[in-house]
Structure formats: structure tokens, C-alpha cells
Image (cartoon, grey):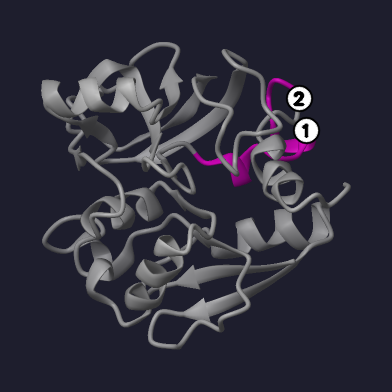
Amino acid sequence: MNVGIVIFPGSNCDRDVKHVLDKTLKTDSKFYWHKKRMPSNIDAIIIPGGFTYGDYLRPGIIASHSPIMKYIQKFAQKRIPILGICNGFQILVESNLLPGVLLKNTSLNFMCKWINIKVNNTKTPFTNKLKLHQKISIPIANGEGRYYVDQKTLSSLQKNNQIVFRYENNINNSTYDIAGVCNKDMNIVGMMPHPERAAEKEINPSGNKSSLLIFKSILNQFHIEN
């Protein structure tokens, strides 16, 4: 299985993701610089968190115009699984691969803490190992993580089962407690919390590895035992 991890100037969670994939799950992942071409044999793509281009203008907007995004757009059309985490979520939104917008937290502060989210959709390549309504203890780290959509778009998300994760306690006034969404084809998922920072029980205060199931779901999508 060939998982591509995309790196932009300012990405800082790429090695965390690679550690989980390669060391914990024993998969084969590779880094791809944002100016390089992605090969056609990619099985899944992960856009990690960070502060691409220093979050100038707004988070994700400059990265959304990087050369590699034209390849990611093509992979998206082919329904290749794509996961955007935190800043990766912002990039997917700015690239119009996912609906909505990420706004400044209502506190206007950077939030870095452990929270709980609940699984709202188990039909995606990144949630098929999870159970509906399962609670996951997971950290957030963002200053502009407040997900917003208008009522019409929210109704569409609900109708099409595109709401993937919801906050147990809405920490930043995100629309409908949304912590993660997917596209209509459900191959693209964006989430603000960081599953790569909670995938091993040694670094998870709850002592469980629920977040690891997000990555194991990718393997399950391709019927790989782990």
C-alpha cells in the first residue's frame, strides 16, 4: 500500500503521521514535497497539520494553489482516499474539495487541549473500523478551527451523511458541533483534531487507541490485515 504524505512549507505534523503509518502500522508511506509530482500508483493521501506558509492571508489558502494540488484534485476525482488533518482540513476547504470554511475560534485564542469527539459516519475510508457514536479522546491544536456553513449547506451535509465527527462539547462554537466532514463521495475527509497525536496509548491520557482506528481504517479499505 502506497500512502503519500504531502509536505508544504510550514507543515509540522508530517513526521508524526509517518511514524504512525510506518512504525505502528508497518505500512509504506512516502513524503511528497508540494512542488513535486505525485505518482499514479498512490493508494491514499494524507495532508498533515501545521502552519503552511505561516498562515498568511488565511490558513490553507496559499497551499491550496501549490503545484501538487492539481494532482490531488485528479486523485480526488478518481475517489482515492484523502485525509486532511487540521491545517490539511483547511487546505481541502480552500481547494473546494470539501464544503465550508474554518474561522477563528470564538475565544480568538489558540486552543491546545484534549477533547472528546463522537463518530457520526462510519462509511468513509478513514472511519470504517469505528463504531457509530463511538467516543474518541483526541487533542486539538488550532487557532482557526471553528467550522462554519450556512443552514442550506448544513442541511445538505446532514442529508448526505457528510458529517463525520462531532465535538462532545462544542469548544469553539463550530456549526452543529462539527469536528470533521467528508465530500459526497465520502473518499475525502477533513478533521480538525489530531489523530496522529493520540494513536498510541503511551501518549493518550485515556489509555486507549481509538484514534489509531482512523489509520487502521485505511488499511481495512484495501483489505490489509493489521
Q: Residue at x 40, y 25 (%)?
A: 161
Q: State whether the magenta stretch is mostly helix, strand or loop.
A: loop
Q: How crowded is mark 1: few (under 14 residues within 10 Å), some or many (20 or more)?
A: some
Residue 201 is marked as 1
Q: Where is residue 147 in the image (x, y as percent from the top left)?
A: 25, 32
For the residue pair 223 and 5, the one nearer the viewer reads as 223
Examine the rendering and report whether any part of residue 173 can be seen: no
Measure the C-alpha gap from mark 2 to mark 1.
5 Å
Q: How crowded is mark 2: few (under 14 residues within 10 Å), some or many (20 or more)?
A: some
Q: Which residue is drawn at 11% across and 61% down?
A: 57
Q: Position of residue 22 (x, y in %)?
A: 77, 62
Dot 1 falls on a residue whose secondary structure is helix
In the rendered image of this protein, does residue 43 appear above or below residue 152?
Answer: below
What amino acid type should be assigned to the residue bearing mark 2? Asn
**Left-right relation of 77 to 221:** left
**Left-right relation of 194 to 199:** left
Q: Position of residue 101 (x, y in %)?
A: 19, 41
Callout 2–callout 1 Cβ contact below 8 Å: yes
Asked which quadrant contains residue 142, the reply is top left
**Left-right relation of 183 to 127:** left
**Residue annotated with mark 2:** 208
Q: Which residues fall within the magenta stretch?
A: 194-208
Dot 2 falls on a residue whose secondary structure is loop
Q: Residue at x 58, y 70 (%)?
A: 4
